[in-house]
Amino acid sequence: IVDEHNPALPIVWKAPVDAPRFDIPEQAHVFAKDRWTGSPLVAGLHAGRGAVLWTATDPGPNGYERFPYLVQALNDLGFAPPVRAQNLWAFFDYSYRLRADPDYLAARWRRAGIAALHVASWHFFEPDPDRNAYLAKLIEACHRHGILVYAWVEFPHVSDSFWTAHPEWREQTALLQDAQLDWRKLMNLENPECAKAAQAGLEAMMRRFDWDGLNLAELYYESLEGIGNPARFTPMNSDVRREFQARYGWDPIELRSTHNDAKSRRQFLDFRAELARRMQEKWLGVVESFRAFRPDLDVVLTHVDDRFDPGIKDAIGADAARVLPLLDSHAFSFLIEDPATIWNLGPQRYAEIAKRYRALTPHAGKLAIDINIVERYQDVYPTKQQTGGELFELVHLASAAFPRVALYFEDSILAPDLPLLAASSAVINSFASDGKRITIDAANDVEIAWRGAALVDGKPWPFMANGLLRLPTGRHSVEPAPECAAIGVTDLNARLISAGIESDHAIKFEYDSASRAIVRFARKPRELAIDAAPFPPPCPLADEATSECAVLLPRGRHTVTAR
């Protein structure tokens, strides 16, 4: 199939279908056709006040197996989503965006519903004038457009320079070779001197830039082939081997010779999972100590799923059941990474993953899911990478199952998907409109299409801009209202709890956020207060092009008043 929304993308059906060749009206627009014959397969035309979308066959059981861009076609015909959300996370790697303007990217990401960017921090671990300037500009642009920025840390990979400078601290595989596996160059963080140097470098980087959070990602071992591939199996550094031998009386390097039996393998694999959990707890403590100089710092631990695919635990030492109890004593979010072994399964898996993790912890509100938007190694149809209807269903069902959804990574999201991504993350229980009044029940904070001033639940409402009106979670009614002189709020990167306009035209709203929050005003406030205390400066991040201004607010639950 060739679809005009992405003509270069290979779209292949899993099985052939016999379909007649149709003649379509001259005024119809062909969205998709057969690559070889040019026969139309998806077309649309406007009719009266509405439009018609036609397909030559049914779209498949989930709606995307044959025509991935049906939602885009509907949007082109005028059927725009009436609701959207702006709470997605996305990963960002500087090496893919060397020539892109950060201000352009930040505006694009926010329109796509991105609330936080997790930046590959190993590129910035050591000071460098050019890279420092780039990252500072990126963070400032993100803040100005209402996006938070997290340091994405991939320990035991520290940085390329760290690897080059310290060959004595390199992790070892079961072949006693330096553990340079794929792009990660693993260091031996069990070595006290190595850990001390890595911690000092990490703290310096966290002080050097204006971070909102830190993501400790994939803090365990390699690889998906586990003990079966000694060329990739870690950790086999001398510190780990010495500790294991002191406890069990034999050197784990002997797993390939005299201790190549089931009992011995189980001993080391369990020890390895315990070691990973110990490492995660230690570095969580280190990162939390950074709140001494960054009190609003949010912390995330990214951990590959080992419940849906239980083989992951022995393969890489990742054991969620060991790690989740840390939520009792540490303040962080647990971001579950979709393992590559199940990327070919359907979107329905997210409800099942959520169910299995909620059974392991009372802190379900701290769970999040990471979706890998990449080319899959399995045989998948109709596209190798998730796009169109499949991507939207992945994001939507994941958003219904988890409080937070992250996407790996921002550069892999295809251009036709970006304008509709925010709509796919909105979770709506009910929606009704009679032309003048909208009644909505939303499972997360959402924005609805709306023009002009509004009453929300009978009260004047300040959260609206660019044809969108922001609503908190729950059931609300929206109806037209007379224009008001109060300053408007165009965006809030936080959970909105309540809002209103006072009799003196001051606006007041309450929010809750695990990190700093960002509020964007339509124009610079004359006065700003948080919890009734003056809050200077009134507008450190101004947008000269639009007169909007963004203000960074403290983490936690607070009430803001603006005039």
Image (cartoon, grey):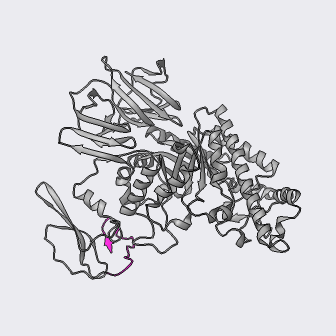
What secondary structure is the magenta-colored segment mainly?
loop
| Residue 172, percent from left and from top | 78, 63
- 14 inside magenta stretch: yes
Q: Say which residue appears at 37% left-offset and 53% top-offset.
A: 424
Residue 364 seen in this snapshot: yes
Q: Quadrant of the N terminus?
A: bottom left
Query: Which residue occupies the extreme front position in the image?
Result: 359
Q: Say which residue appears at 66% left-offset and 57% top-offset.
A: 318
| Residue 558, percent from left and from top | 48, 27
Residue closest to the eye, 528 or 135:
528
| Residue 60, percent from left and from top | 32, 70
450 sits left or right of 139 in the view: left
Q: Is residue 208 above or below residue 405?
A: above
The image quarter in which residue 418 lies: bottom left
Residue closest to the eye, 333 or 10:
333
Q: Is residue 23 above or below residue 141?
A: below
Residue closest to the eye, 511 or 434:
434
284 sits left or right of 102 in the view: right
Q: Is residue 9 above or below residue 148?
A: below
- 13 inside magenta stretch: yes
Q: Is residue 173 above or below residue 557?
A: below
Numbered disc total:
0
Residue closest to the eye, 410 or 227:
227
| Residue 476, percent from left and from top | 30, 36
Residue 93 seen in this snapshot: no
Q: Quadrant of the C terminus?
A: top left
Magenta extent: 1-16
